[in-house]
Image (spheres, rainbow, N blue to C red):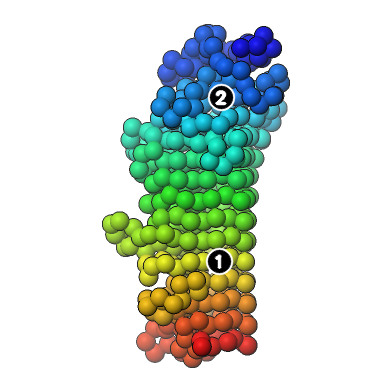
């Protein structure tokens, strides 16, 4: 180890003080006492106290076998200690390697809602280069699961870049976020999720948990509930207030996972998905009590919401419907807007089951929602249910679309006796 790097590690120990010794496990305590003999860092930033390297500074091995929980806990505790004036001042670096982590909350364990902070950054060496394998002993916990990250109303503006997260214990969860106004603004860039998860990100609380962005990420693996679940309702004092969760943006995504739901929003909304490939590669191994064998990309199951959250937009996406248990959207909103623009789900239109697909499903009420498809290529039929006692107004429009399986006259799957006057087709090409 170079003298310069040893000095930087000592500076971090001094800044951090003795608090690391309070963390569970010998790793953090050894770091606080100066017992680490860590290798030299490769980041080139080790001389700046704002950069914390989990290998060089905290002794993580990244060999896929050693439990690196203590190193990640110490890195986060160091970053938390350096925050000042409500601003975080630390970038946590994760060099190339496969890091086995067994302790829930090892990557992020924020539980100081009275001391809210803005700005925390986790940076890996690149997608599939820095891999954090979360393998807890069990999957039960106070927040509905065992989570690698936990933010209790504390941090806003957290970013993750160039990292892979793998569930090493089937049914583990990635991120629990509880907010009454203190948790928001998450950003994921060039990240990947693999393995079998219960939840990817689970949102709970009564306010914010908003403004979250995913860019050029890959969602793989499988999800017993959903990759992003808004409205967990475990600790919320007023569950209806979870409609404050809004503004989620997915751009240039590779959503190719085995089974489960991608987005599920019992509460909240205002979602935009732009560009990418969306594929479910298999089907659930056993029937789920709510979903059966089905997997859905977009599931909005509750009719009534506060204004301002019932908005969904999908654009420039190629969907592959490889199985008749795959659903693109199932929406029960009683108002709001749903818009698909330049999307294509016809890749498997040649297969025998495709004509009978009902992969787009809506429940229409007196207030809609307003549903529009522009310049899309669509397979199977689209199902429209009617809410009890409702007579839906004209609220569905297909404009310049290609209907790959059926002409417009038989494209809608309706309730018995349901009138089709709510739907309009403009310049659509029939199946050939």
Q: CA distance from mark 2 to mark 1?
A: 38 Å
**Which residue has dot 1 on it?**
318
The quadrant of the rendering that contains the N terminus is top right
Which residue is nearer to you in this view: 133 or 2? 2
x then y, percent, for residue 227: 47, 51
Secondary structure beneath label 2: loop
Q: Residues within 10 Å of mark 1 (few under 14, many from 20)?
A: some
Residue at the (53%, 12%) spot, across then down: 36
Tell me if residue 294 can be seen: yes
Tell me if residue 364 can be seen: no
Residue at the (51%, 86%) spot, across then down: 431
- For marks 2 and 1, the one nearer the N-term is 2
x then y, percent, for residue 411: 47, 85
Q: Residues within 10 Å of mark 2 (few under 14, many from 20)?
A: many
Taking the image as shown, residue 304 lies to the left or right of residue 208, namely left
Determine contact: label 2, label 1, CB under 8 Å.
no
x then y, percent, for residue 168: 39, 38
Instruction: Give the answer, above or below, for where 125 lies relative to 193.
Output: above
**Which residue has dot 2 on it?**
54
Residue at the (49%, 17%) spot, across then down: 28
Which residue is nearer to you in this view: 245 or 70? 70
Taking the image as shown, residue 384 lies to the left or right of residue 251, namely left
x then y, percent, for residue 341: 62, 71
Taking the image as shown, residue 158 lies to the left or right of residue 422, namely right
Residue 138 marker:
none
Residue at the (62%, 21%) spot, across then down: 41
Secondary structure beneath label 1: strand
Which residue is nearer to you in this view: 106 or 167? 167
Instruction: Give the answer, above or below, for where 321 lies relative to 350.
Output: above
């Amino acid at each position: 180890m170079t003298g310069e790097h040893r000095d930087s590690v000592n500076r971090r120990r001094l800044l951090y003080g003795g608090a690391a010794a309070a963390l569970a496990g010998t790793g953090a305590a050894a770091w606080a006492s100066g017992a680490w003999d860590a290798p030299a860092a490769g980041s080139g930033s080790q001389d700046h106290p704002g950069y914390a390297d989990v290998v060089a500074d905290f002794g993580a091995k990244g060999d896929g076998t050693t439990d690196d929980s203590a190193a990640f806990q110490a890195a986060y505790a160091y970053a938390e200690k350096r925050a000042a004036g409500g601003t975080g001042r630390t970038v946590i670096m994760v060099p190339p390697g496969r890091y086995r982590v067994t302790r829930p909350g090892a990557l992020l364990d924020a539980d100081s809602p009275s001391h809210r902070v803005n700005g925390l950054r986790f940076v890996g060496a690149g997608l599939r280069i820095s891999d954090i394998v979360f393998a807890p002993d069990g999957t039960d916990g106070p927040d509905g699961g065992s989570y690698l990250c936990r933010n209790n109303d504390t941090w806003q503006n957290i970013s993750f870049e160039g990292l892979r997260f793998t569930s090493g214990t089937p049914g583990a969860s990635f991120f629990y976020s509880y907010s009454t106004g203190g948790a928001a603004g998450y950003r994921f860039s060039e990240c990947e999720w693999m393995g079998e998860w219960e939840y990817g990100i689970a949102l709970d609380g009564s306010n914010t948990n908003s403004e979250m962005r995913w860019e050029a990420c890959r969602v793989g693996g499988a999800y017993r509930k959903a990759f992003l679940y808004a409205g967990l309702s475990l600790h919320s004092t007023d569950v209806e207030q979870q409609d404050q969760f809004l503004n989620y943006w997915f751009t240039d995504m590779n959503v190719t996972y085995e089974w489960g739901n991608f987005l599920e929003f019992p509460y909240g909304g205002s979602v935009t998905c732009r560009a990418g490939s969306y594929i479910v590669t298999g089907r659930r191994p056993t029937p789920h009590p709510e979903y059966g064998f089905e997997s859905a990309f977009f599931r909005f199951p509750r009719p009534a919401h506060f204004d301002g959250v019932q908005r969904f937009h999908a654009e420039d996406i190629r969907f592959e419907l490889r199985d008749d248990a795959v659903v693109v959207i199932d929406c029960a909103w009683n108002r709001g807007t749903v818009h698909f623009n330049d999307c294509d789900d016809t890749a498997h239109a040649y297969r025998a089951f495709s004509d009978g697909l009902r992969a787009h499903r809506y429940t229409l009420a007196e207030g809609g929602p307003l549903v529009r498809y522009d310049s899309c290529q669509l397979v199977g039929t689209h199902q429209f249910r009617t809410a009890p006692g409702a007579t839906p107004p004209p609220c569905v429009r297909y404009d310049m679309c290609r209907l790959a399986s059926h002409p417009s006259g038989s494209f809608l799957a309706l309730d018995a006796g349901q009138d089709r006057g709510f739907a309009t087709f403009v310049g659509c090409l029939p199946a050939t």
